[in-house]
Image (spheres, grey):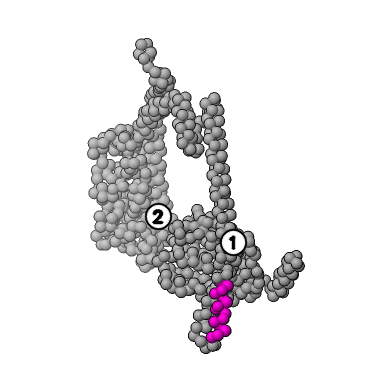
Amino acid sequence: MNFLRKLSLFQKLLILLLIVSVIPLLVSGYMLITINQEGLQEKIKELHKEKAQHMAEEINRFFGKVQLNLLTSIQSWHLSSLGKAERQGLLQLTLSQNIEDFRIVSLINLQGEIFEPAVYLPRSDERQNLPMKNEFNIGEVDVQNFYQRISYDKQCNENVYYFSEVYTSAARQGVFMIISTAKCEGPAPNQQLLVAAEISLYQLQNMISNTFVGRDGYCFLVDQDGVLVCHPNFNRVLAREDMKSLKIIENLLKKNQVFTMNYINKRGENMLGTGAPVRGLGWGVVIQESVRDAFKSVREMQIVASLITVFSLIFAFIVGFLFVRGITKPMSAFVEGAKMISKGDFERKIEVSSQDEIGELARAFNDMGEGLKQRDIELKKAYQQVIHSEKMAAFGQIGAGITHEIKNPLAGIIGQAMLALRKLKDDSPLKNNIQLIKSETERCLDIVKNLLTFTRQEKAVFEPVDIKHAVETTIRLIAHQLAIRGIDLQTELKDIPGKVHGNANQLEQILLNIIINAHDAMEDGGKLVISTACVDTKWAEILITDNGPGIPEEIRTKIFEPFFTTKEPGKGTGLGLSVSYGIIKEHNGKIEIDSEIGKGTTFRILLPLKSEDELKELEKERLANLRKEAAGKT
């Protein structure tokens, strides 16, 4: 008792659980083993007896089939009316009809003299599908051996069958015996002849070899002298091994019933053997299996019972340990969770699934953490929105100032360029250069206007736009820059029936933004493919495909946001794609992106096509709106 007082509650509970769980299992395991062991052993012996009896019956059926086949073949013979060639034909027919079992067939008289020479060579096509082709390698020595082994009674009668002793042939790799029976109707009056046939025991050998008896057991067949007839190890059969030294063979030759016994085999192993006599021949079938393997299920039961006990001990220990920890662990988790929340980690959860007071406290604690997490997310979103609003407001102010600061110098450049064009002759080499200066300066003015459009201070003028021409114009502007970077530019520009109602400069700016992004992404060169097509007669499609590094999936949804950029500081404003997205939406179009890391990116732009009548109607509306605005100002 003093010992128990010194133990903690945790230790006392564990000991109690171990006693309650282990003692019943030990008692039940012992009863299970002792009560069922004999029953299991008897069941195994009965199974062996059934298998041995079945094998003996199969062997009897085999010889019954052989006798019936021989009888069926000769019962219609009328030898008195047949010549020598015809009798040979009958023997050949008998061999062919029983090719699976017969190897040699012959006719002799009761004095042992050959009446018709042996027939033993079936047609080549008949031998093709036979498993034991070596058994047909029959020579004169085999034929002489056949005649010497024929067993019969000189007073034999019809329908009485005689069997010779079993013999083997190493050359033919087979086991044989001879069956003979009388055929009384000979060519001469009252002449008695004997039909003899060599039987192959291949089917019995195959059946014995394929009989499964546990892991290390097997089946074999012995004759009336205890000599092997069939065995899984065919070399032992060819050697005609004598098995009488085994106790089970000695008993088998004496008894005329199925029995089971334990004995020691030639290798000194303790075996469980079952013998079954083959009636009519004096042979016997033996099924043997090591006692270790035969009664393996009994040992497995013992092992299982032991494992159950061990695992029960472990289980009881784990249950007790978890029971005590179930009370103390949540308290520790509350303390740790409070510390983590104080550091700003609101993902911390108290994992308690019980429905008691501790469970309610844990759920309340988790709800508190989730509420704090949501408030933190909302605060961060509000903070980002404030920053974004400030940026947009500042950008709008800067954009308005830039417009006034840049427009006048650009207008001056355009004016000077126009004056220069008027003074130059048509064939002057400078004319094209000055014309390019004028057009590019005009485009700069349009870019400033687009910037104001983004800040909602100006509205672009829409007019009919040839998409193919807009793409070609953009390509001319950027082609040289792409070539310097080592980018292979390929175009597939198809004519598009119809035009887009929009602003050409804005659309060219969209293309330029996307192409420049592709240019920056392919730092070591690459391939850029630009194509145009008409989709469903309703849409103008522009595809811009590069084989750059691709865009990660997690940022694809952000690339059209203002000020979002993946470029290094100072190399990008984050406005290009956001401006492009706004322009496309203003044109009632669509922009899609398909990208795969390591393979490249494709931008797909769809713009609605308008017919000539629709374009004229839209132009009328634009002019009418201009007149209304002018009238309102006056």
Give the labeled residue for mark 2.
Answer: 70
* Residue 102 lies in the magenta stretch: no
Q: Position of residue 19 (x, y in %)?
A: 40, 20
Name which residue lies at 62% across and 69% down. 503
Q: Position of residue 80 (x, y in %)?
A: 40, 62
Disc ID at residue 400: 1
Q: Are marks 1 and 2 in contact (CB under 8 Å)?
A: no
Q: Is residue 428 above or below residue 605?
A: below
Residue 589 horizontal side relative to residue 530, left or right: right
Q: Secondary structure at mark 1?
A: helix
Main SS, magenta region, reads helix
Look at the image and tell me in which quarter the C terminus lies: bottom right
Q: Position of residue 159 (x, y in %)?
A: 40, 50
Marks 1 and 2, how far apart at CA: 117 Å
Residues rendered magenta in the picture: 410-424
* Residue 417 lies in the magenta stretch: yes
Q: Quadrant of residue 225?
A: top left
For this rendering, which residue is in front, 411 or 555? Answer: 411
Q: Secondary structure at mark 2?
A: helix
Tell me if mark 1 has few (under 14), some (14-19) or many (20+) residues whose alpha carbon lies within 10 angstroms of its own.
Answer: some
Q: Is residue 389 above or below residue 214?
A: below
For this rendering, which residue is in front, 258 or 66? Answer: 258
Given the image, on which type of amino acid does mark 2 rest? Leu
* Closer mark to the observer between disc 1 and disc 2: 1
| Residue 421 seen by the camera | yes
